[in-house]
């Protein structure tokens, strides 16, 4: 405080004492060089620090929870993949077992001895040249024809009228293979093979059907 102000305050105090009034409380002298420092309450600072700690803790907990959920999802996906692989392996194993069982039930036919120039010999050669069917298919075809006509070119069923080696009904159907269908075994066999291939795919397919139904 400057000197003139201090002098004025002293004068006022003196006047008041003379008049008989109560002197005002002394005015604290503040040095011109003393700085005034405002301090913020420590409680606010502490609360702010606590709030920051709480936010960081919540973020860490959420991150840990998300990481745990991600691990659970990954484990579930791995379990599903493992289960699918096991199921596929079981299905493949079952299919292989069924195939093996079916093969075991399929009778293996022995290939009969074929004399050259006979109807059997003609059929065997024709099956191989026309359809690529080997001994296994010939064995099936031989079973069919043996039961139907015994390879007799003129065999006739008295009840139905079926005729020839394949027992065509009527026999005239075989004319599509040749005009000599009544007497030529090659013509009758050619027609019979075409019928079997068109209806059953293979001679063994025809034999399987005949075994189950009694006719083909």
Image (cartoon, rainbow, N blue to C red):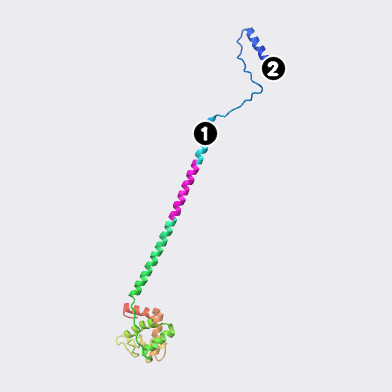
Q: Residue at x 36, y 69 (%)?
A: 97
- Residue 176 at x, y = what percent? 42, 87
Instruction: Name, please, the residue furthest toward the left.
Output: 159
Q: Residues within 10 Å of mark 2 (few under 14, many from 20)?
A: few
In-image side of 13 versus 73 (left or right): right
**Element class at badge 2:** helix
Q: Is residue 55 magenta?
A: no
Which quarter of the figure has residue 110? bottom left
Vertical relation: 49 (above or below) 17: below
Q: What residue sits right under mark 2 in the picture?
A: 3
**Element class at badge 1:** helix
User: How many marks on residues?
Assistant: 2
Which quarter of the figure has residue 120? bottom left
Which quarter of the figure has residue 44? top right
Q: Residue at x 44, y 57 (%)?
A: 78
Q: Residues within 10 Å of mark 1 (few under 14, many from 20)?
A: few
64 or 136, nearer to the observer: 64
Quarter of the rendering occupied by the C terminus: bottom left
Q: What residue sits right under mark 1 in the picture?
A: 47
In-image side of 198 versus 28 (left or right): left
Which span of residues is magenta-colored?
57-76
């Amino acid at each position: 405080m400057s000197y003139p102000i201090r002098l004025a305050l002293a004068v006022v105090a003196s006047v008041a004492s003379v008049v008989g009034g109560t002197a005002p409380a002394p005015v604290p002298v503040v040095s011109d060089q003393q700085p005034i420092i405002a301090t913020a309450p420590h409680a606010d600072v502490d609360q702010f620090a606590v709030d920051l700690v709480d936010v960081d803790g919540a973020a860490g907990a959420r991150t840990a929870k998300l990481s745990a959920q991600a691990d659970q999802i990954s484990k579930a996906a791995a379990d599903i993949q493992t289960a699918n692989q096991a199921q596929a392996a079981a299905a493949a194993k079952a299919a292989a077992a069924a195939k093996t069982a079916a093969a075991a039930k399929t009778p293996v036919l022995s290939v009969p001895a074929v004399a050259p120039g006979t109807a059997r010999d003609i059929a065997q050669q024709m099956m191989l040249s026309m359809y690529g069917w080997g001994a296994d298919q010939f064995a099936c075809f031989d079973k069919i024809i043996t039961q139907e006509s015994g390879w007799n070119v003129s065999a006739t069923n008295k009840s139905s009228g079926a005729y020839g080696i394949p027992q065509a009904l009527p026999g005239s159907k075989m004319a599509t293979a040749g005009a000599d269908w009544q007497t030529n075994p090659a013509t009758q066999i050619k027609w019979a093979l075409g019928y079997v291939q068109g209806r059953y795919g293979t001679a063994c397919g025809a034999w399987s059907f005949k075994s189950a139904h009694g006719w083909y």
